[in-house]
Image: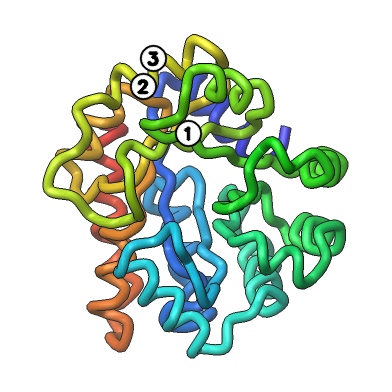
Amino acid sequence: MNRIERRFADLRAAGRKGLVVYIGAGDPNLEATRQLALAFDGAGVDVLELGVPFSDPLADGLVNQLAAQRGLESGTTPPRLLATIAAIRRESQIPIVLYVYYNLLHRVGLDRFVAEAAAAGVDGLLILDLPPEEADEYERLMTAAGLCPIWLVAPTTPEERIAKICRRAKGFIYYVSREGVTGMQAQVSETIGQMTAQIRAHSAVPIAVGFGISNAEQARSVAQHAEAIVVGSAIVNRIAAHGKSADLVPTVTAFVRELSQAIKS
């Protein structure tokens, strides 16, 4: 088991739900990313997703696009991010997933990127624009490195394709609970229960539901239908608001702790 698999096994044994948190790496800078990661570990976060800054984040809404831009402006590159993750690993074993676009892996070289990510302490990759049908070499490299390839299922994914994705799933399956790009929503989708049941019919791999969860009440509601929830934009938005403040880490961590308590109490 790598750290993701071990964490979900521990959650299952304890009868608890997991919290997956997304932030843009290097927003406002990599030292803040390191501090936030350590604080989140103590606040009940089970998996940390770090968005690797990219110039064309087409799956992301405005909040996360701006975070990617701030990450680029702070000088965050894949090698510098991996060095930051290695620094986090000296103090924490929080499971870490890189949320990344395939161009960045292609530019470095797929085998090199996977090997260096594993060496730094990364546990999984979520590649937004790599279809599973074209991922045989990627999955081979990930398996050899002991990393989990995280796959997405959307509300529009046909049943036959859900079954194919589930057969390849490791770590957790990320259910994108609504169509469109990332972003906060006033209401969560009403089809989450139906879709998670459909996914679960094909796989025992844990399901994490994301896209649009914005507050503790929504988190508690969605957690009834999945092994974990994913919150991103609502946290990234707070980082944007407090990025220049000395209170950035405690302020954002307080919100994250509220989410954790909502799904685990």
* Residue type highlighted by circle 3: Ala
Figure check: 122 above or below 12: below
Figure check: 137 above or below 34: above
Figure check: 228 above or below 164: below
Which secondary structure lies at badge 1? strand
Q: Quadrant of the C terminus?
A: top left
Q: Position of residue 208 (x, y in %)?
A: 43, 34
Question: Which is nearer the N-term, disc 3 or disc 1?
Answer: 1
> CA separation, marks 3 and 1?
13 Å
Query: Residue at label 3?
Result: 197
Asked if labels 3 and 2 touch by Cβ distance under 8 angstroms, the answer is yes
User: Residue 64's quadrant in the figure?
Assistant: bottom left
* Residue type highlighted by circle 1: Val
Asked if labels 1 and 3 touch by Cβ distance under 8 angstroms, the answer is no
Q: Residue at x 48, y 33 (%)?
A: 153
Q: Which mark is residue 193?
A: none
Question: Which is nearer the N-term, disc 1 or disc 2?
Answer: 1
Looking at the image, which residue sits at the far left? 186
* Residue type highlighted by circle 2: Met
Query: Residue at label 1?
Result: 153
Q: Residue at x 49, y 89 (%)?
A: 73
Figure check: 62 above or below 59: below
Q: Residue at x 74, y 42 (%)?
A: 135
Query: Residue at label 2?
Result: 195
> CA separation, marks 1 and 2?
9 Å
> CA separation, marks 2 and 3?
5 Å
Q: Position of residue 254 (x, y in %)?
A: 26, 60
